[in-house]
Image: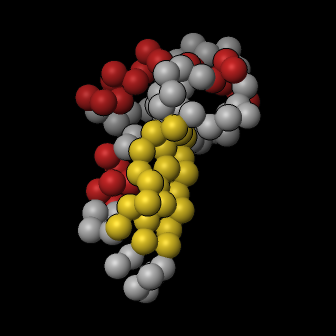
Amino acid sequence: MVGAGGKVFLRASTPYQRPFARFAGEYERRVEETRAITDYRRLGQYPASIDLLDEPIPRRLFAGWEAEFAGYYRRHGLPASLYLDGRESVGVVVRRV
């Protein structure tokens, strides 16, 4: 439990990466396994299990907290083949008030 004045930093991958581009629309309609949908040739470099988040999930988790940042961003340093449209990662920095 985080007390008053505590701060949380959260960063996660999103379905808005090139390997999951065909899946992103499906993700928005329903949360489902991605491995059966993607044909990304380097998918084997991913862990056997990956949890994808989109922006509404952390916003809901930290509703009522003061947000310093909450949104999508492009995480630099990833292989160029992962970039899709700038929403490849999602993060929040929130403070409990």
- Residue at far front of view: 68
User: Residue at the location (43% across, 65% down)?
Assistant: 94
Frontmost residue, 48 versus 67: 67
Q: Is residue 93 above or below residue 55?
A: below
Frontmost residue, 72 versus 46: 72
The location of residue 3, given as percent across then percent down, is 43, 86
Q: Is residue 36 above or below residue 12?
A: above
Figure disc tally = 0
User: Residue at the location (67% across, 39% down)?
Assistant: 47
> Where, quadrant-wise, is the N terminus in this rendering?
bottom left
User: Residue at the location (70% across, 31% down)?
Assistant: 78
Left or right of 11: which side holds 58?
left
The location of residue 62, given as percent across then percent down, is 34, 63
Residue 39 visible? The answer is yes
Frontmost residue, 1 versus 67: 67
> Where, quadrant-wise, is the C terminus in this rendering?
bottom left
The location of residue 57, given as percent across then percent down, is 35, 50
User: Residue at the location (40% across, 24% down)?
Assistant: 24
Residue 35 visible? The answer is no
